[in-house]
Image (spheres, rainbow, N blue to C red):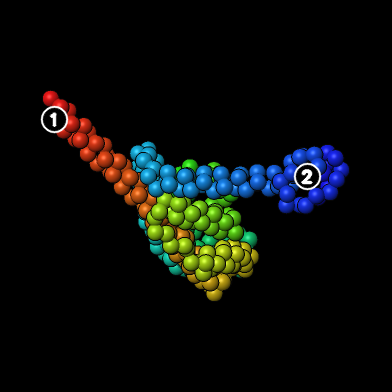
Amino acid sequence: MICKKCGREYEDDMPQCLWCDAPNESLSSQDECETSSADSEAQEEAYKESLKELVDPELERAFDDNVRRGKSAISWTKFQMVLNVIFFFVEVKTFGAIAAFYGSYKVNAPIPREVNLAVWTLIVFFMASAIPFCVFIGKNLLWIYHAHKEQNKFSETQFSPWGATICYYLPIANYFIFKTLIDNQYDTMKSMGIKAQAVPNKLLTWFLLFNIATPIFNYICLRNFNTPVLFISTVLWFILTILYIKLIRVATANEQAVHDQLENNRINKKVEEIIAQRDVNQQNTEQT
């Protein structure tokens, strides 16, 4: 080690120069780094301990409300699945007649009764399913918005609540929305001392694969409408929706676990306050 003050050489592990007593700057900086690292670890441990005893009634209610939103979103998603199965059979019956008519259409040719019936069947079905479809979309978006909003109170995520809401139905993007949310929930639960189980990677992987395959077959179906392609597209959407439900259930279960922990903390704190107040009253009684 060369001393910067006097220019003489001394051992690297010595705390100061032998000739002019100048401090060894390399050791000083190393000590500062170790101290800083120790402080950050201590702060992290203190934060984890505070989470284990966290009492926040407002946050507790927020998690409880979003658990209800998640269950409602699952129910409406299941209902939408039923509507889509019905729509598949409606498409098979109606689109075939319409396509056959327009494939051999002649100018001023009368429109057959079957074609009129098919068109009106589609119109009635779309009108009847429009409101349930909007509710299904709204319920899911409302849940994912609040899921990220509440989770952001514990840890920062790649998606803001509005970002997650906007990208929720975008292929591939929604894979990262779920992965980020569930991973952060897992870390939060571990910090709070809750027994957490990580989501299986297979579930997320299958979700990603069907996220890619479903839009592709939907596009093929639009370009070349036929029953086999329509059937495959419907099956892919059906499986993708089931995977959606499974992921929502995982995230909702995590929210329920955090809510239960917050509720237990609140009850325990209340019990401790009651016991402390009782002890104070007993002491006052004994003194009098």
Depth check, front residue: 117 or 179:
179
Give the label on residue 101, or none.
none
Q: Residue furthest bottom?
A: 228
Q: Position of residue 171 (x, y in %)?
A: 59, 58
Q: Secondary structure at mark 1?
A: helix
- Density class for disc 2 (Cα within 10 Å; few <14, some 14-19, many ≥20) is some
Q: Residue at x 56, y 72 (%)?
A: 229
Q: Residue at x 52, y 64 (%)?
A: 204
1 vs 221, left or right, is right
Up the image or down, 168 lies above or below 276; here it is below
Q: Which residue is mark 1?
A: 286
Q: Residue at x 83, y 41 (%)?
A: 4
Q: Position of residue 41 (x, y in %)?
A: 54, 48
Distance from the alpha carbon under mark 2 to that under mark 1: 69 Å
Q: Position of residue 23 (x, y in %)?
A: 74, 41
Kind of residue sitting beneath label 2: Leu
Q: Which residue is mark 2?
A: 18
Asked if residue 23 can be seen in this view, the reply is: yes
Depth check, front residue: 72 or 180:
180
Residue 22 sits in quarter: top right
Asked if residue 145 can be seen in this view, the reply is: no
Q: Quadrant of the C terminus?
A: top left
